[in-house]
Image (cartoon, rainbow, N blue to C red):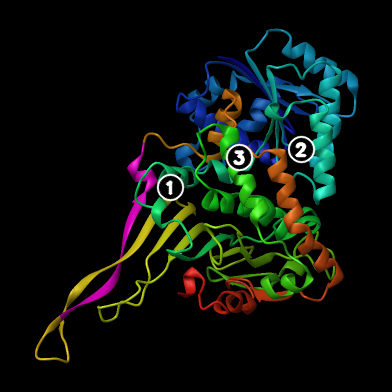
Amino acid sequence: MSFDLVFFGGTGDLTWRKLMPSLFQAWRHGKLPADGRILAVARDERDDEGYRLWLKERLQAADSAKRPTEDEFTRFASLIHYLRMDLSQPGDYLRLKGWLDTRSADTTVMYLATSPHLFPVICEQLGACGLNHDRVRVVLEKPLGHDLASAQDINRAVHAVFTEKQALRIDHYLGKPSVQNLMALRFGNALFEPLWRRESIANIQITLAESLGVGTRGDFYDRTGALRDMIQNHALQLLTMVAMEPPSSADADAIRDEKLKVLRSLKPFDAASVTRDVVRGQYRSGSIGGESVKGYLEEDKVPTGSRTETFVALRCEVQNWRWAGVPFYLRTGKRLAHRHAEIVVNFRPTPHSIFPGASAPNKLVIKLQPEDGLELHLLAAKGSVASAGAGAVQETLSPVSLDLDFDKAFPTDRVGAYERMLLDALAGRLNLFVRSDEQEQAWRWVEPILESWRQDPHGLRTYGAGSWGPPAASALVARDGFAWAEEA
């Protein structure tokens, strides 16, 4: 298969930190189709060789195992080209079309790694010069809007040029191996599906924790905040994967139809439930890994007195027969105790315990980062102790875990999240991309939270860097008789 892959925003952080390294790994693994060209588009004055040298310097910052050798980079770089473009100038799109028309590739993918406010103009100009034919797909990087209205505006602009099947809204968390194995775990095995319901599950926790602060992105982050940056997209997509009904097939729309049903089943928020079930926080100075770090208001480019949240914890419910009454807890934050992302499924305790000390219910931990894997926490016999009656002996139980490390289980078949998503975009596999109605429904659900916060600017709590967030987040879960995984 021949392909042309065009990166708008070719000199941006996303392109050189994530996309180009992922493409290199796909090439190194022999998974990138052989007859391909990669075109970086940006405003800088460069030629092909200048861009390749610029990219080579940046790839040296990759982990040593993922860093190209001199020979590897020379061969990989032969695929890479550069075109200077001003995205507001129609004539520059004609030059892009001329470059692409030097051959007729089987597939052309336009990856918009730019600010979302440029999506409408890019799509309009691509359509005006005929770069929206049926062999073209466009990939839209988040964030897609800052509220429902802006997301709908972007979708209208995209749909005026591209069909829904041509527009791929990327959420790289869906490309993580553990998330893919969540689908296999539920729908490829007979073990868990009978237990995957309210009768057996006490609660589900989704945590997306970062130990880093906002770094040099203070101005961007302050316009975004944790709810828009992580909950509206990543956390809700993970929730749909956990809670969805079995799709009728592995077809992309069959899967996305079921995810949409989950989003529509989420209990809506109002002002009272936001106050009761949502905690927002902002990190202050503290210590992480033995080093002192500054608070959010002291970060570069953060406005004085900002009320932007860097932490969100919330309780929600999926109102359907499978999940009625089961609380889902979502949590994300910056400058937390350590970096990890995981889904924890806490099962209900046995209805009657005959063993002393059997107090820890079973749980399934789906680890997303920094490692990918599954842990099943069980109880096993620890040893015998004398009981109070007639010299009888009873077994005592203690927690044990079955640990599946995907890196060890599949050492030669592993692909990273962006690598998987890029390969799927080239192949036209839509299963892992978000449909516009999913995206808009997610915005529709979080909007009452944003509106409530606008009406109540004083509900922001602070937490020390290196902690697990405001104490109110622990109280949120404790109110139902539960605890976050690290507190259990």
* Res. 114 mark: 2
Residue that extends furthest to the left in the rendered view of this protein: 391
Query: Residue 453 placed where, x, y %?
Result: 81, 68
Is there a contact, CB below 8 Å, between mark 1 and mark 2? no
Residue depicted at 58% across the width and 57% down the height? 320
Q: Amino acid at mark 3?
A: Arg
Query: Residue 396 placed where, x, y %?
Result: 22, 77
Q: SS of the residue at dot 2?
A: loop
Identify whether 85 is placed above or below 16: above
Identify whether 438 is placed above or below 340: above
Marks 3 and 2, how far apart in space?
Answer: 26 Å
Principal SS element in the magenta part?
strand
Whether residue 21 is visible to the viewer of this picture, yes or no, is no
* Stretch of the chain drawn in magenta: 394-411
Counting residues from the start of the chain, the first of labels 3 and 2 encountered is 2
Is there a contact, CB below 8 Å, between mark 3 and mark 2? no
Identify whether 123 is placed above or below 459: above
* Res. 256 mark: 3
Q: SS of the residue at dot 1?
A: helix
Q: SS of the residue at dot 3?
A: helix
Whether residue 277 is visible to the viewer of this picture, yes or no, is yes
Quadrant placement of the C terminus: bottom left
Foreground disc of the pair 1, 2: 1
Q: Give the camera-side residue of 147 and 268.
A: 268
Query: Residue 207 placed where, x, y %?
Result: 56, 61
Foreground disc of the pair 3, 2: 3
Answer with left or right where residue 361 lies relative to residue 8. left
Mark 1 highlights which residue?
186
Q: How many marks?
A: 3
